[in-house]
Amino acid sequence: MDTQQEIQEMQDQYGHLMALLPALENSVELWREATQRMQTLCDFYFNPKWLEYYDAADHFQIDTKGNYSVLSQDAIWNLLAEYQTLTEQIKPLLERLD
């Protein structure tokens, strides 16, 4: 690759990254919201009251909007596992930027 090609390649890389920036900025907000919601769900799930609610689940009418019920044994647990998997994939990418 000659000098002209190398410079053009870097210019193209720059252009692609500039195009990605708005989505990356939006993803920061999405991660912030997801983290807050996950913490709220974990606080609920790991509270001893959750087991009481679970035992009485038949007495509650929950509009799940097509999702699993938060009173099912695995719904929040599986969501937490998926969230942790995503964070484990992202952490090394962020560490490379340091």
Image (tube, rainbow, N blue to C red):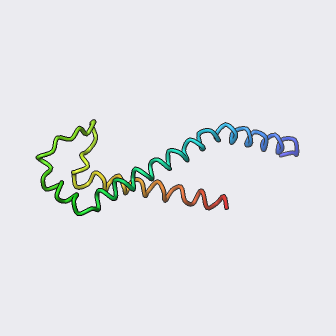
> What residue is at 56 percent from the left and 41 percent from the top?
26
> What residue is at 57 percent from the left and 60 percent from the top?
92
Q: Which of the image's four quarters has the C terminus?
A: bottom right
Depth check: 35 or 79 in front?
35
Residue 57 in percent (x, y) is at 15, 49
Depth check: 29 or 72 in front?
29
Depth check: 94 or 59 in front?
59
> Is 95 situated left or right of 68 in this image?
right
> What residue is at 81 percent from the left and 40 percent from the top?
8
Residue 28 in percent (x, y) is at 55, 47
Depth check: 6 or 36 in front?
36
Residue 35 in percent (x, y) is at 45, 53
> Is 9 situated left or right of 78 in this image?
right
> Is 43 situated left or right of 26 in this image?
left
Q: How many marks on residues?
A: 0
- Give the residue furthest to the right: 3
Residue 97 in percent (x, y) is at 66, 58
Q: Is residue 65 above or below residue 68?
A: above
> What residue is at 54 percent from the left and 59 percent from the top?
91
